[in-house]
Image (cartoon, helix red, strand yellow):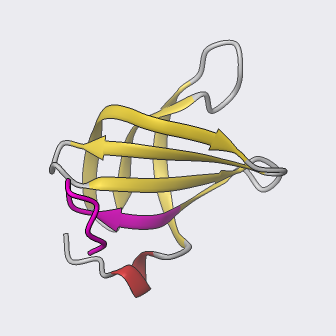
Amino acid sequence: MTTGKDEAKGQRIRVESYSGYRAEERPVSFCVGEEKRVVERVMDQWAGEDHHYFKLLADDRKVYILRYDRFRDEWTLERVANATGEEL
């Protein structure tokens, strides 16, 4: 993936998520452009006033931060980093 940090911030993406008792509980895969990534592990998650954030390790060994806007029902890519945390 060639997404740089300036390109990534706020980019809308498609996300497939597991929904248990809550809608959009956690991402299981996501697409950035035509590239599909499978979530290997949810590393962290936290909630803001109207957003939910997920820090994910994907199958390409990169770390992604995704943001889910609960009011708009919209996912965005906020950050991409390598496994050491260096932003790409």
Viewer-proximal residue, 8 or 49? 49
* 86 magenta-colored: yes
What is the span of residues highlighted in magenta in the rendered image?
77-88
Residue 23: percent from left, percent from top: 69, 27
Horizontal relation, residue 10 to residue 27: left or right: right
The residue positioned 38% from the left and 43% from the top of the image is: 56
Horizontal relation, residue 52 to residue 48: left or right: left
Viewer-proximal residue, 39 or 14? 39
The residue positioned 20% from the left and 53% from the top of the image is: 83
The quarter of the image holding the N terminus is bottom left
The residue positioned 44% from the left and 46% from the top of the image is: 55
Q: Quadrant of residue 43?
A: top left
* Residue closest to the far bottom: 6
* 17 magenta-colored: no
Count of marks overlaid on the render: 0
* Residue closest to the far left: 60
Residue 74: percent from left, percent from top: 66, 56
Residue 11: percent from left, percent from top: 50, 73
Viewer-proximal residue, 30 or 54? 54
User: Compared with residue 9, is residue 31 higher up or lower down, i.e. above or below?
Assistant: above
The residue positioned 50% from the left and 76% from the top of the image is: 9
Horizontal relation, residue 16 to residue 23: left or right: left
Residue 72: percent from left, percent from top: 78, 56
The quarter of the image holding the C terminus is bottom left
